[in-house]
């Protein structure tokens, strides 16, 4: 049996403007079925999805895993493309509702497995911890906003900008030579996140999907500029590129994966270097001059304490959420959750 393909992304980001969600574009409502898991902390949503994903992978099916941006060890979604089926945690802060209730989107209420009578005596503790961990997220968002505000717009010379665009056009001409014209819609994901584990990038997804990795320097924002151009070129050819958005600026592309053509364009900065072996390394910042690179370095030093404080707040939020889950876990019927999970796995695998 051929080894199944496993890709990993985030659909949410802890961003300067608050939580940024891409969950609405996870599935095609006209072609895929989405199971929306509802229920509060500790009811087994992530565990259920992990078991479904493992069963699909063991059966040789490709799987897309969606990690939680607050806690990357937890799953917030899983898709099995060959079955046209996906599961997602549809609770706050990434509330998901079906496009066509019952036909395309189906609710799965894991909260039904709570022992409500047993939870009533700890109601005040639940309320206190819920407010406390959400307050830490609000603090993290404010700190990320402060760091983003320090990311001054540098006056990059027009010739450096044109050089970056010229180089990426050259890459695209080379990579797309002979690539088929398609009609695939672009997808949007996050490959990185600010989380309780620090700044996390799911780098293993890149070589899993793409054979050639082009690394673009981006301390001056030239990599971002180049990726916008590359995305437009891929869109014009109808290729299903995966635009991985920047969690600090969710409207901008941080990495671009083009699995249909076998290549990826990923950016790196001095703070977040790409650990992958590059097919080619484009030093886009070099033409801008030493003074601008020095200014970018100064900005990074100013941002660093704010980013560390933001990460501290996210770690505290995770600790408080763990305390909250500890109140629910002893009062949840996990045998019922397991039985429901097995039923979903059987239905998934019987599609063979």
Image (tube, rainbow, N blue to C red):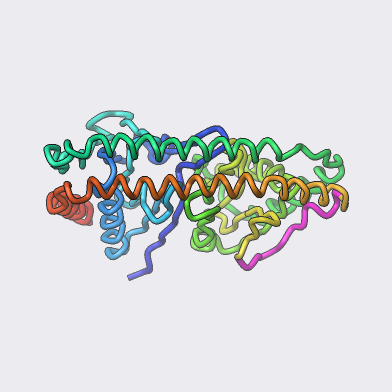
Q: Quadrant of residue 128?
A: top left
- Residue 177 location (% of width, % of height): 65, 54
> Is residue 163 placed above or below 154 in the rendered structure?
below
- Which residue is found at the position 45% from the left and 43% from the top? 11
290 and 287: which is toward the camera = 290
Regarding residue 243, the answer to whether it shows in the image is no
Q: Is residue 287 magenta?
A: yes
Quarter of the image containing the N terminus? bottom left
- Residue 139 location (% of width, % of height): 52, 37
- Which residue is found at the position 84% from the left and 47% from the top? 292
> Which range of residues does the magenta coloring cover?
276-288
- Residue 30 location (% of width, % of height): 34, 34
Q: Is residue 109 magenta?
A: no
Q: Residue furthest top?
A: 100
249 and 86: which is toward the camera = 249
> Is residue 129 placed above or below 176 in the rendered structure?
above
Q: Is residue 181 left or right of residue 171?
A: left
Q: Residue furthest bottom?
A: 1
Regarding residue 337, the answer to whether it shows in the image is yes
- Which residue is found at the position 57% from the left and 55% from the top? 261
168 and 22: which is toward the camera = 22
- Residue 178 location (% of width, % of height): 62, 55
Q: Is residue 143 left or right of residue 333?
A: right
Q: Is residue 121 left or right of residue 270?
A: left
Quarter of the image containing the C terminus? bottom left
151 and 5: which is toward the camera = 151
Q: How many marks?
A: 0
């Amino acid at each position: 049996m051929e080894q199944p393909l496993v890709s990993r992304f985030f659909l949410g980001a802890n961003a300067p403007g608050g939580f940024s969600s891409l969950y609405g574009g996870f599935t095609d409502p006209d072609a895929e079925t989405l199971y929306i898991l509802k229920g509060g902390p500790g009811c087994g949503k992530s565990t259920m999805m992990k078991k479904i994903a493992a069963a699909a992978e063991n059966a040789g099916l490709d799987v897309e895993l969606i990690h939680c941006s607050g806690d990357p060890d937890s799953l917030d979604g899983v898709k099995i493309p060959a079955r046209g089926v996906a599961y997602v945690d549809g609770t706050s802060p990434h509330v998901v509702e079906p496009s066509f209730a019952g036909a395309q989107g189906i609710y799965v209420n894991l909260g039904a497995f709570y022992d409500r009578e047993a939870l009533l005596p700890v109601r005040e503790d639940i309320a206190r911890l819920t407010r406390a961990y959400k307050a830490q997220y609000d603090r993290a968002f404010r700190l990320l906003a402060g760091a983003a505000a320090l990311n001054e717009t540098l006056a990059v010379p027009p010739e450096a900008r044109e050089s970056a665009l010229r180089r990426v056009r050259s890459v695209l001409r080379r990579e797309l030579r002979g690539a088929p014209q398609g009609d695939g819609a672009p997808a949007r994901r996050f490959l990185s996140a600010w989380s309780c584990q620090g700044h996390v990038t799911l780098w293993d997804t890149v070589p899993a999907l793409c054979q050639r990795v082009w690394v673009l320097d981006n301390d001056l924002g030239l990599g971002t500029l180049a990726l916008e151009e590359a995305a437009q070129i891929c869109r014009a050819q109808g290729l299903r590129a995966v635009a991985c958005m920047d969690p600090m600026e969710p409207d901008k592309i941080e990495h671009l994966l083009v699995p249909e053509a076998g290549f990826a364009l990923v950016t790196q900065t001095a703070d977040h270097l790409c650990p992958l072996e590059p097919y080619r390394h484009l030093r886009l910042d070099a033409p801008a001059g030493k003074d601008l690179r020095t200014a970018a370095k100064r900005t990074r030093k100013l941002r660093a304490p704010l980013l560390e404080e933001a990460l501290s707040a996210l770690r505290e939020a995770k600790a408080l959420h763990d305390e909250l889950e500890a109140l629910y876990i002893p009062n949840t019927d996990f045998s019922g959750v397991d039985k429901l999970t097995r039923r979903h796995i059987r239905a998934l695998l019987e599609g063979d």
